[in-house]
Structure formats: structure tokens, C-alpha cells
Image (cartoon, rainbow, N blue to C red):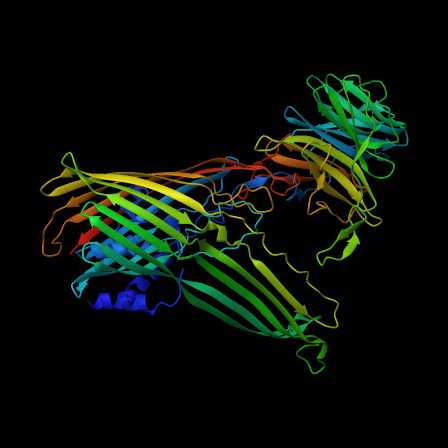
Amino acid sequence: MRALIIVVASGLAACGTEGGVDGGGAHLPSRGIAGWVVGDALAIASPADATLTDPSALVVGDEVVLYLTKTSPDGDAIVRTTSRDGTTFGAPTLLLADAAAPSVAARASGFWLAFEDGAGIALAESDDGLSFTRVASSGLEGLSDPSLVVDGDRLIVFAVSAEGSIVRSEAGSDHTFSAPTVVLAPIAECTNAFGEPVPCWDGTALAGPDVRVATTPTGRTIWRMWFTGRTSVHTDLGFAASSDGITGWTRYAFNPVIKQSTSSLSPTSIVFGADYLLYWAVPTTDASGIANARITPSATLSHPTETW
Amino acid sequence: MRVALVVAVLVLSATAARANPFDYIPFGARAMGMGGAYGALASDYSANFYNPAGLATRDDLQLSIGYTLVQPTLTLNDEDLDVDAIRGFQGGLVMPGKVWGHRLALSVALHLPDERVTRLRALPESQPRFVLYDNHPQRIVLTTSVGFEVVKDLVYVGVGLTYLSDTQGRLRVTGDVDLQDENGTTLLSAVDVDFKAVRYPSAGILLTPRDDLRIGLTYRDEFDLSLDIGVVVNGDIVINGGTPERTPIVEGASLEVTSKNSNLFSPRQLALSIAWTPELCGLGWAFAGELTWSQWSRFISPTALLGTSLTADPLPLRIPPNPAPTDPRFHDTLVPRLGAEVKAIDGANVDLTVRLGSWFERSPAPTQTGNTNYTPGVKLGFGLGFTLDVVYCSDIFPKPLSLDFGALLEWMPERTHNKSNPADPVGDYRSAGTLIGFTTGLRFAF
């Protein structure tokens, strides 16, 4: 009997097939933090003596709109360019002169723009996203690299303080901003895999926050932040998140997420169709200086599970 | 009788023990139709799992063969994880006899998956998976049992053993590694893999105080299959290897990487079952209930514990230690099951029995708010089925031929998992699922 069982078992096992994608490993949740596939630098036409930096991405309809700082001998200006696929962008058009580091957020009708105007953070608004009108100064002086979040009537600005921390300030419908409070600060010392103290990847300063308010698959609100971390040697990109946008900002355990041979600055991330897209600036001499990466659904990765 | 002796030898030669897919789907078509409330009724091959004592209530030799297929649709955030189906041949043999005037029955039962005999797998603990379905049912089950009538027509006892094998293996590599020239590298390898037999016991008692009342108690021991594999490299790191100018840089270097993990855990179980088999309205009925306690609190993380050791002095090389897997913090469960069947047609040549059953199981896993992503949910199961007994007397089949069919629907309502760490790599998710399947089989009595 035992021999019979063994013979039958062997025969049937040999006829069998391996089933499933890793037997349960298909369509695993994808929340757009890791797993980026880095593409070529964007081919955005710009004058030879100009560089493009500080990308701020927004999805408007079926287009990706990229707001950028254009630095040329004429000074800094904010420009805008669009793409149907997130990779191929048209020639940028001028939005605001004497302005830099744009962050655009959609409101119920129209758009808000936060930017650097030399003295601090300034605001502008627009009905169509093409023509912006400056409004009264935010009063947020001494800050840089704004990231704007619109929450109903509230405007919330995340920016970088002179100390290299990321701060938060918010304003109501009167556009009077509260005193900034630190939400994320550099941490000088981390622990390596051996439990030994080592310098942190973002130990010197933080920069370039990009904050988005996302909804998770369970309906919770999560505040997502991409940011730049600096040491004396590297400039890389990392991720942090908070449940309320005010407290409990927690760094991703496997930061930095984007670590390349060149410095990486000013990340901005969007959900575009079924893909997550991440753009950032790189100090190179190529066409645009804007790098990009993408996470696409696959046999093992689901569609975006967090959306904004 | 010779076959019975072989089974007896198999039973008695076992020394230790362990479990199975029937924690997740009922074993056999009749059990499936009864919603798994079968511990007090089982006397066919499935008694090997439900209660081996029931084997001794059988008078005729019975051979069963069938097939089971259960297709899961288990989703995270509404997307199907493509978990493998539970499918394979099922069957067994029950051989009754008498010793000192008391009934004795030996039995062997087999669940033989037709895609793989057994799959051992250690995924990262952060990878979301339906941990009790993605791999646990993917294994062969071979059980041998013996049932004995202790007190005539009143008390029956049974014991059983289920077999599988642990895997322990090492790839041992020795030789020289040339830092500069790959042609100077000479390595000899040896593989040493040991598939050690493991067995887990089950035992049962069955009381029949009245002709229409059966009370059973079944114990099934805990099962945990270990997978222990590794690579051991010993040798010298040299330059100019394989030449007269061979110069050692490191003498006696060694690298050992081992991976140990627990697979296919099945909890210790105690099942109390009762069946009432009255004649009502001229029809033969069976009402059955079962309550199973499962000790899931001892669930062992299926994540591999990686061990690394490197000696390469004087080179400044080292490998960081690996953290131990997180305690899954499962908790024990109580699973109630109810089933009923009625002989709807009691004909001269054809009998038809139909049945219905249901069960409910709380999730043994807590809501997954931390690093782990084991996602079993609450389960509500329904079974239905029938048995068609055909009297087709011949020299070959002197007793009725029985065709069994059972169908199953198991529903896992949506469960939400909100992560305490907002920067968790996986993030919040919803899990849900259904399993739909059937078991069919033929029973031949002699």
C-alpha cells in the first residue's frame, strides 16, 4: 500500500503545474513610497543659459502640469509646462517674474500658488492656473521652499526655516498665517545595522518639502511629505508621513528613497492615472535638470492605494 | 489482512507527531456538506481527521476516492492576490475487523494536492498575505489511524498519526577564492539535505449511549514544519590561485548563511462533537454540532530567521545581525459548527441523502497595525451536499455504491487594517475574501 501511495503521489506530482503569481503575491498594495523606476531626465526645452529647478507637479484633467523655477541671467521666474504622459513636456511658458520655488494647489475653483519672492513666502491665486495674481504677503519671512496645501478655506504652508527644519503655518480666509512650528528637523545621529551611531542621511538640513493630503484605502487621511535631506556629502530624497499633518511626522524606515550619484533636490509627487510619478531637480547640465521616476501597476503591484 | 498489517505497522512505528489543510476546508464530501460538524458522525476515511474512534463503528470495508477543489478569491483593497486553489485527490481505506470480540478498524487517509506535494515558503513579514491560506493548505496529508471498541456498542477510542517531513539542508563549499582571477578560483561543493520524518498525533473518543446519540471528543496535536537551509563556505582568499605563486590573503575564511523558519503551523485542537440521528416523520435525520478550540496563540511567525557568520581576518568585513521576526500575537479561537442531513429518498435501489451545514470562526490574528501583515479575517462558512447510494449488487460490489458531493462557500467580510505608523511601507488596507469549492467522491463498500 505504501509503495502504491508513493507511486501515485509521484506520478500526480509530476503532472502538476506551479500555479499563481507567487501563490498570493499578486497586486500587493502600492502606496507610492518605494519601488521607483528612475527614467531619463525630462526633455524640457529651455534657453541654453537657463536652468529649471524646483518642480511642483499637479494633475489637471488628463494632463500633468509642472511648475518650475527658471533661473537665467534675467533672474528667477516661475514657468509652467504640461504633459499628456508625464514624461514628454512642452516648452515652458512664463507665469510670474521675480519669483521662485513654486508650489501650486487646486482649490474648489481655481488655484493657489505659494512661492519665494525674495523676502519670504508669497501667495498668488488664479482661476485658470495660467494667469496668477499676487495677493497680500503671507508674512512668512525668512522661510523658503514652500509647499502649499489647501484644506477648504484653510491654507497650510510647509516651508524650510533658516535652521534647515521643515515648519508648518496655516491661515484662514483672511490669509493671516500663524507662527511657524517645526514638524520635521534634522537628526544628526542615527544607528546603523550594528547598533552603532552614524551620521543620518538628513543630518545637516532638510529642504524642499512637498506635502499632499492623501486618502488611504480604508478612508483615513494621511499627510504625505517628500523632502530633501542633506549631509555635508550627499543630498538625497526621503519620505515622511503624519496622520494629522501637525504632529507625529514619522520618517520612512528605509530613507533615503532616492539616492543617486548626483544630488537630488525638491521632490514632488503625484498620482497620474494608474501611476505614481515623482519629479525632482538634479544639478546637471542636461536639457532640463528635472529627473523623474514612476511606479506602474504590475503583476505584483496593485494600482495606487493612496490617492490625492 | 496483509494490508491491515501494513497500516498497523505504519501506525505503530511512528514516534513523534504533527497537522493540515482541513483546518481551512472540511475533509471529505460529507463533512463539507455538514459544515465540518462531523466529529461524532465520521466513520469513513475522514474519521482519520475528525475522530479516529468513529472508525470502529464501521462494519464494512470501505474504499473511497475523490477530488476536492476550493478556489479562493482573496483581495486586498479589492484586488485579487491570486492565492492558489486548494485542490487534489482525497481518499482512503477503512478496514474493520474484530479483536477479542471487540471491533477494531484500521484506516489510512490521503489528501494529495495535484499541483505540488508540499510547499515551504518564508516571505518577509511585511508582505501582506492571507497567511492561513496562501501556503498552509499546500501540502500532502497522509494519516493512519486505528479505532477500537472499548465497551461494546458504547465506548470507542481511536488514535491517528499524520506524516510529513522537516527539511534540513546545507550546501558546503570549500576551496580557494581568487581575488584577481576567476580562473584561479577552485571550489568543491557538497550538498547535505535531510528530510526528517515528523508525525503528529490525534486521538478521539466516541460515546454512543443510545442508538440515536453519538458524542465525540477529538484531540489533534500542534504541528509545525521547520525549514532549515544554509550555505557554508570555507576556504582561503588568495591571489594567483591555481599557480605555483599562490599567495593566501586570508587563510581559513568562512561564511555561513542559514535560514530557519516555521512552516505550515497547525494549532493544537480539541473538538467536542455531538450528533442526534432520530427518525422523524418517517425520515432518517442527523443533526450534528461541534465546537473546536484551536490554540492559535502558539502560532509561530513564518518569517525566516536569518543567521550569518563571517570570518575573514584580517579583512575588515562584517555582516550585520538580522532582527528576529515579530511575534504574530495570534489568539485562540472557538469554532462552532452545525450540520443536518436527511435521507430524502429511501428507495429499493437508490437512496438520496441531502445535507446542509454552517460554521463561524473569529480571526485568530489581531488587526494588523504594525510591521506584520497577516490578514486572516472572520470566516462564515456554508456547506451543502448529497449522497447517492446505489444498490448495484455484483460479485465486485456486493454493497451499495455511494456518490458523495459537497459544496462550500466561505465568506470573509471586509476587514480594515489601519497602520499605527503613518509612514508604514504598506500602509492602510482592506482585506476580504471568499472561497468557493466542492469535494466529490465515490465510496465502495465490501
Q: How many marks?
A: 0
- Horizontal side of A106 relative to B78 (left or right) equals right
Residue B250 appearing in the image: yes
For the N terminus of chain B, the quadrant is bottom left
Q: Position of residue B91 (x, y in %)?
A: 28, 54
Q: Quadrant of residue B416?
A: top right
Q: Position of residue A209 (x, y in %)?
A: 77, 35
The answer to whether A140 is drawn above or below residue B31 in the figure is above
For the C terminus of chain B, the quadrant is bottom left
- Horizontal side of B28 relative to A105 (left or right) equals left
The answer to whether B211 is drawn above or below residue B229 in the figure is above
Q: Position of residue A193 (x, y in %)?
A: 70, 56
- Horizontal side of A28 relative to A260 (left or right) equals left
Q: Position of residue B410 (x, y in %)?
A: 39, 39
Q: Residue at x 77, y 19 (%)?
A: A125
Q: Nearer the viewer, residue B218 or B364?
A: B218
Farthest-out residue, bottom: B244
Q: Nearer the viewer, residue B211 or B419?
A: B211
Residue A288 appearing in the image: no
Q: Residue at x 56, y 62 (%)?
A: B259
